[in-house]
Image: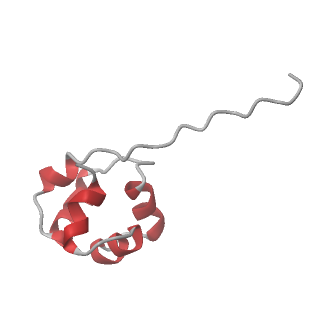
Amino acid sequence: MTLQEIVAPLGLRTYGDLARKAGLSRQRAHQIWYGRTGIGRRVAKRIAQAVGVPVGMVMGADLPKRKILLPRRRKGA
């Protein structure tokens, strides 16, 4: 279960919602929301307290699937 799936039933639909609710910067919330960075213990605790779920649930959240972008082939190559 991803972090988005954990917090969606609680009314948090965007990383901005998560930032406001958990007291995170929008940049940090964006990185966590899209799986660009992991969730440390302190941040997991803040998120868990803000949304009312166990810390272990936040720490165990799966990273969202990311698209892998491959370089474009050059024409004529």
Query: Is 17 positioned to the left or the right of 47 in the image?
Result: right
Q: Dividing the image into 4 quarters, which one contains the C terminus?
A: top right
Locate residue 75: give its quadrant. Answer: top right
Quarter of the image for residue 44 reads bottom left
- Picture coordinates of residue 51, whole percent (x, y): 18, 70
**Is residue 22 positioned above or below 62 on the image?**
below
Could you say where residue 65 lies in the image, as x and y percent from the top left?
Answer: 40, 43
Query: Against 66, is 22 above or below?
Result: below
| Residue drawn at point x = 48 percent, y = 64 percent | 27
Colour logic? secondary structure
Residue 45 against residue 22 in the figure, above or below: above
Residue at screen point 45% across, 70% down = 26
The residue under the point 35% across, 75% down is 17
Question: Residue 35 versus residue 77: which sits nearer the camera?
Answer: 77
**33 vs 5, nearest the viewer:** 5
Residue drawn at 20 percent across, 72 percent down: 10
Most extreme residue toward the top, as rendered? Answer: 77
Q: How many marks?
A: 0
| x and y percentages locating residue 71 in the rendered image | 69, 33
In x, y percent, where is residue 8?
A: 25, 67
Give the residue at the far right of this rendering. Answer: 76
